[in-house]
Image (tube, rainbow, N blue to C red):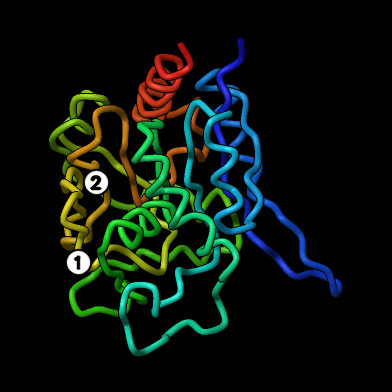
């Protein structure tokens, strides 16, 4: 039986209509590298929780949108044009419930930010604008240049065990990042400027990891990415059995 992984979709307005979509590269990485079948979870709020019993894992994917600041107690909104309330209403609840029922969870870019907020942490809204921080936001028009390796990260804990290295080079395409980590998150990857790049849910009995970079980008060509997706897939298969 196929191992099925849910990917939350974004609510995107175009030509006067709302579309539910996610970048195809996340599903491609699951299918081609991890051997899992991806299915989109529509941004329909708590109604999406009814899908969890039919899934073997959840992948919180990246998105150009940002988590609304009020959801983590921030009074100032620095990116009011870049929100997706329907996705927030779905993913924050979905992440908590997936962890509660023991589903393997892999969070990428916006996904790791959602995971942190869902568990009680806060975000930096423009991390690249903070003093001493690297230019984490990729603005190149050429996609290959935008997703090219940009800086190293130091690994520890389960992330280091899975990848088999203590330091790797990663891409960097994000405006926001973890500010105060949630109490249940163990920090397992850090950029040279101190930006939190990888976390693990400490209380989770199985795979529950988030990374700020994009391992789904050309995942089959990168050893660290293949190992991450393989570990996630193994946890999903175990859950399926």
Tell me if 147 is positioned left or right of 121 in this view: right
Q: Which residue is mark 1?
A: 180
Q: CA distance from mark 1 to mark 2?
A: 12 Å
Instruction: Please identify the quarter of the rendering in which residue 141 is found.
Output: bottom right
Q: Quadrant of the C terminus?
A: top left
Tell me if 229 is positioned left or right of 139 in this view: left
Q: How far from the left and from the top, in percent, is residue 136?
A: 35, 64
Tell me if 27 is positioned left or right of 19 in this view: left
Q: How far from the left and from the top, in percent, is residue 210?
A: 33, 44
Identify the residue at horizontal 45%, vertical 69% (top origin): 67
Where 10 sits versus 29, above or below? below
Where 62 sits versus 2, above or below? below
Q: How far from the left and from the top, in percent, is residue 87?
A: 56, 61
- Secondary structure beneath dot 2 equals strand
Where 190 sits versus 236, above or below? below
Q: Which residue is mark 2?
A: 199
Contact, mark 1 vs mark 2 (Cβ under 8 Å): no
Q: Name the one closer to the observer, 126 or 6.
A: 6
Q: Quadrant of the N terminus?
A: top right
User: Which residue is situated farthest in the bottom direction here?
Assistant: 76
């Amino acid at each position: 039986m196929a191992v099925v992984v849910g990917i939350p979709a974004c609510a995107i307005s175009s030509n006067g209509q709302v579309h539910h979509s996610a970048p195809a590269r996340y599903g491609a990485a699951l299918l081609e590298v991890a051997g899992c079948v991806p299915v989109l979870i529509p941004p329909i709020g708590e109604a999406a929780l009814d899908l969890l019993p039919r899934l073997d894992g959840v992948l919180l994917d990246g998105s150009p949108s940002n988590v609304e600041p009020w959801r983590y107690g921030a009074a100032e909104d620095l990116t009011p044009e870049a929100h997706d309330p329907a996705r927030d209403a779905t993913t924050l609840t979905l992440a908590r419930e997936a962890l509660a029922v023991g589903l393997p969870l892999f969070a990428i870019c916006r996904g790791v930010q959602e995971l942190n907020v869902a568990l009680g942490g806060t975000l930096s809204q423009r991390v690249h604008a903070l003093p001493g921080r690297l230019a984490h936001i990729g603005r190149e028009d050429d996609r290959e240049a935008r997703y090219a390796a940009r800086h190293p990260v130091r690994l520890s804990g389960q992330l280091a065990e899975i990848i088999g290295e203590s330091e790797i080079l990663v891409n960097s395409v994000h405006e926001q990042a973890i500010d105060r980590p949630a109490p249940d998150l163990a920090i397992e990857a850090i950029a040279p400027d101190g930006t939190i790049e990888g976390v693990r849910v400490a209380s989770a009995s199985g795979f529950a990891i988030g990374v700020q970079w994009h391992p789904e980008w050309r995942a089959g060509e990168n050893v660290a990415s293949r190992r991450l997706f393989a570990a996630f897939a193994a946890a999903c298969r175990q859950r399926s059995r």
